[in-house]
Image (spheres, helix red, strand yellow):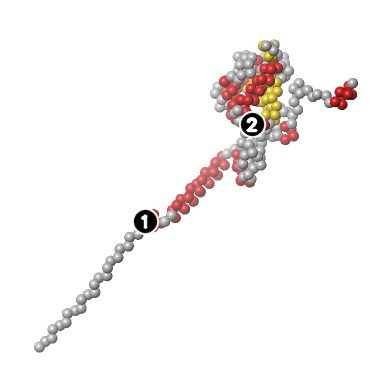
Amino acid sequence: MPTEQEAPPAPPPPKPLLIIRRKGGGHAGHHGGAWKVAYADFVTAMMALFIVLWLMSADKEIQQAVSAYFNNPAGPGKLTGTAAAGIGNALEVHKEDMNKLAQKIQQALLQVPNFRNLKDHVEITITSDGLRIELLESEAGTFFESGKPVPTETGSELLVRLAGELGKLPNSLLIEGHTDSKPFSKDGYGNWELSVDRANSARKLMQANGVRPEQVGQVRGFADRQLRHPEDPDAASNRRISVIVQYLGPAAESKPPAEAVAQAPSKEEKSQRH
């Protein structure tokens, strides 16, 4: 009698399927923060490129100022980042640089409203004292009210623009007032007082708009003792304000005219005279 075939053994039970879920998956989880480093390097490289392009197109004074900063970031002056005077863009105006300064001031004054109508009343010359900037009056009173030390609106705008440019320089300034020879007296107030007060009014306005107090070396009034047109002492252009940018170094120590300064005799001189 045939034997019955044994049933095949049952297959082993399937292993349980484990699903592991990780937080923070996706693209950011796969790459981590590496893209941030690459992006920061790219931005830094672009910034360096733009700085180089800017320096290549900048003028010589700015290039020198930037170079001075990296050579000596502390700077010996009042403001950090300069190796020269520590003021503004570190432009030092020596005698050989006065032509450049004159051109720069002319460009700045062109931004004053209606300056083209005033160009015949503004004269910039290089003298032995330095760069002389003169505001020449007209019969109607272009820069100051007639017979008063009060600047007109046009005069104020011009002086403010000048102050913004000259305040960037380490050079000292002289401010002078002049009148014509027409007799002027009102309650004891004459040409001497008017010339001094107009120069002082110009100083106050310029110091309020960029010129440093210690930058002004002298404020002088000459009345009609230094006429611009001696052949026509009553000419309106004899009335003027002069701002002088002095040279740097020993050459800047110009002596004021004899009319402005009278030196008192010493005790020894007095005794010799007696």
Residue 8 location (% of width, % of height):
19, 79
Identify residue for label 1: 24
Q: Can see residue 172?
A: yes
Q: Residue 254, relative to residue 37: is it above or below?
A: above
Q: Residue 241, relative to residue 93: is it above or below?
A: above
Most distant residue in the bottom direction: 1
Residue shown at 62% from the left, 28% from the top? 207
Residue 7 location (% of width, % of height):
17, 79
Count residues near mark 2 (Cα–Cα under 10 Å), then give few for <14, some for 14-19, many for 20+: some
Residue shown at 59% from the left, 23% from the top? 156
Q: Which of the two discs, 1 and 2, labels the residue nearer the N terminus? A: 1
- Tag on residue 240? none
What SS does tag 2 mark?
Answer: loop
Name the residue nearer the viewer: 251 or 185.
Answer: 185
Amino acid on which disc 2 is placed: Arg
Amino acid on which disc 1 is placed: Gly
- Locate the N terminus and report the quarter of the image it occupies: bottom left
Identify residue for label 2: 212
